[in-house]
Image: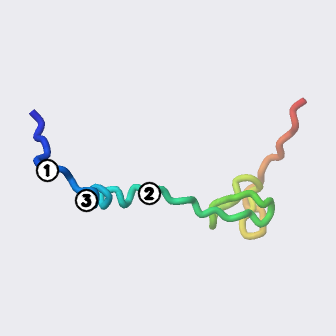
Amino acid sequence: MVPQPKRKHSKGRRDRRRAHDALTTMNLTACSNCGEMRLPHTVCPKCGHYQGREVVAMAKEEKKK
């Protein structure tokens, strides 16, 4: 048999346990080349630019008809 708690945990004790469960927003910045939102200090996944120059050559997408 599993042991059961003898007393109810208070709301303050419960809330202290859950104090670190909050979600945080991602820190996004706009790309200086294309304006797409990206993580700071990373190459833009949309255009491949970093600090004003092209670092990764991106293949151009062709339109399908």
Q: Mark 2 highlights which residue? A: 22
Q: Are the residues at dot 3 and dot 2 in contact (C-beta closer than 8 Å)? A: no
> Mark 1 and mark 3 in contact (Cβ < 8 Å)?
no
What SS does tag 1 mark?
loop
> How far apart are the two marked residues, 3 and 1, measured between alpha carbons?
12 Å
Q: Position of residue 18 (x, y in %)?
A: 34, 56
Q: Is residue 4 left or right of residue 34?
A: left
Residue bearing mark 1? 7
Going from N to C along the chain, the mark reached first, 3 or 2, is 3
Question: According to the image, label 3 marks what residue?
Answer: 13
Q: Which of pointers 3 and 2 indicates the residue nearer the eye?
A: 3
Q: Residue at x 77, y 69 (%)?
A: 52
* Mark 1 neighbour class, 10 Å CA radius: few under 14, some 14 to 19, many 20 or more: few
Q: Position of residue 61 (x, y in %)?
A: 83, 42
Residue farthest toward the bottom in the current orientation of the protein = 51
Residue 26 position, x and y percent, is 57, 59
Q: Nearer the viewer, residue 60 or 33?
A: 33
Label 2 residue SS = loop
